[in-house]
Amino acid sequence: MTDAVAGPIVLTGRKVVGGVAEGEALVTHQTISGWGGVHAMSGTVIESRHELKGQSFAGKILVFPGAKGSSGWSGVFHMTRLAGTAPLALVFTTMTTKVALGAVVMRVPSVTDLDGDPLALIATGDWVRVDGDAGTVQIWKGGARPSSVG
Amino acid sequence: MGSPMVKLTGEEQAMLDGAKGAATAKAMELLIRYADALGAERFVETNNVAGVPGSSIPWVKEYYKADGGDYRAVFSRFDLDSDEVVDVPRMRAFSCHLQGGMDPTLWAEQGMTPEQHANFASDERETAAHGVQILKTCTPYIAGNVPVFGEHCAWMESSAVVFCNSVIGARTNCEGRESTSSAMLAQRVPDWGFHRDEYRYGQHKVNVEVPVDSLFDWGMLGYFVGLAVEDTIPVIDGQLGQPSLIRHKHFGAAAASSGGVEMYHMVGITPEAPSVERAFGANRPGETFTYDAAARRRIYEALNGVGQSTDVDFVMLGCPHYSIEQIAEAAHLIEGRKVSSNSALWVFTSRAVKATADANGYTKTLADAGALLMTDTCSSISAAVPPGTKVAALDSAKQVHYLPAIMGIEGWYGTTADCIDAACTGKWAGRLAEPA
């Protein structure tokens, strides 16, 4: 079989924040620091030695294990919403108070507790649709945009 | 908002419906969104909240200009994440403001402008007017807010959170700005994580096989533990010397920075770890990590990995904010000496502790030597170092983790005495002595 004609991979999990968004995935296997780890005005990861250092999550579906670092996490990600640099949606694997509150105040569709490992199944550049209310993630490998969304 | 999944008591439903005013209703809305995001089933009541309510940089006030750009607008829109601006009453919970943006009198020395200071002073007047205690410190537990065992708290500041859970046995998650500001009004926080017994048990074991019996060594062990266990709960056992408040303060801050530790157990030392078995409770012990002389050396080298030049032009002490015991020691070490003309020494503490330092003459001893005792903030929080700083010396594993990265400078980690010597000579001469 070929991925090109296959339908999307579908993962089902739990709503964190409702709403629907779709776009290109930005994937990291490393947790992300808010305060001291992200430049809110550009949505860029600035932490030394982070694999996303210098990359912006603005307008992307951010797929990551979760949050680490300072209790300023929600405040910094809240600022990305004001600055227009927030991710389109969050897909993550480890629940913490930092990432829960950050997702709430960013007001972007967010899901966790998925029935497959999003960090293994999603690669940067894949096209991803997150339905927060349904708790689902649809993945089109290789970034092929679906012809219709149903 | 849709119907919440978290169960509400009658009083919580009434707050949501506006029985205690519009701001408290907005606070309940935010807390319900947050509880549902976590998957919490209920709230716990809290009357001990530490955050940074309403304080903001001018950029945020400018962003909310259409709403007046004032404290009320920022608190409504940002702190409560509300879609409308509401009147903010006096906070209902016992509430404290954590560290802030600058020293209230030495702000010019920290490189702040009169406009920045006016913004800071205005926020502080509003904070006080809303009944929030102006503690202005990362160490509320030595400045007027000491929780008790089992007390449910809602605290920000990772080093304070880890102290609260581990050393005191009080219960708090690592809260954020919006949840603490909301909890100040609604006196509620989701019953999730560290509020629950089953979440507080140990997950991994750390065996200490080299004596750890100085402030300097407790900091290095903390940094090791955070790297080893990341954000899980370690059970530490072995050759730990006499515990003290300042040793725990340094250990926890280091472990929270290198790994995100929010609670630790030390067998026979911390209140929820009378034995290894009790510390692990229902959990099966995971991995075992060993801290020995080789690990100690590796950590020392890692902490000094961003030091090249031995010409030290800045020494910063007070991360987390110094206790009176530490200020007394610094004053004793520097009495009769002078800070080098090529260097500077800033010591940070809370306003409450500084009042005692003033009374004891320590502030004057430091000033006579050419050092400054500052409050409210630190070099990392405010990105404030003396102009031209290239190489800093620090006695805090947490500060050496953050400051060089934030300011793009070099940093050395050593004992308090190493740092005072560096301030007086302008040269770094720290080294790793054999374990005590």
Image (cartoon, coloured by chain):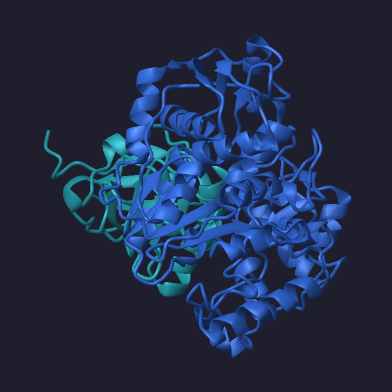
Chain colours: A cyan, B blue
Which residue occupies 26% across, 51% down? B309
Where is residue B31? Give x, y as percent: 68, 55
- Classify B397 as above or below A53: above
- Classify A110 as above or below B245: below
> Do we see residue A142 in this rendering?
yes
Where is residue B88? Give x, y as percent: 77, 74
Tell me the quadrant of the picture where the N terminus of chain B can be found.
Answer: bottom right
- Classify B129 as above or below B66: above
Where is residue B378? Give x, y as percent: 54, 60
Which residue occupies 68% across, 12% down? B275
Along the viewing direction, whichever of B75 and B379 lies nearer the viewer: B379
Which residue occupies 62% across, 86% down? B67
Along the viewing direction, whichever of A3 and A107 lies nearer the viewer: A107
| Left or right, B221 with reference to B130 | left
Residue placed farthest to the front in the image? B336
Res B297 → quadrant: top left
| Left or right, A37 with reference to B127 | left
Where is residue A116? Give x, y as percent: 37, 32
Res B123 → quadrant: bottom right
Along the viewing direction, whichever of B196 and B210 lies nearer the viewer: B210
Along the viewing direction, whichever of B226 and B209 lies nearer the viewer: B209
| Left or right, B31 with reference to B116 | right
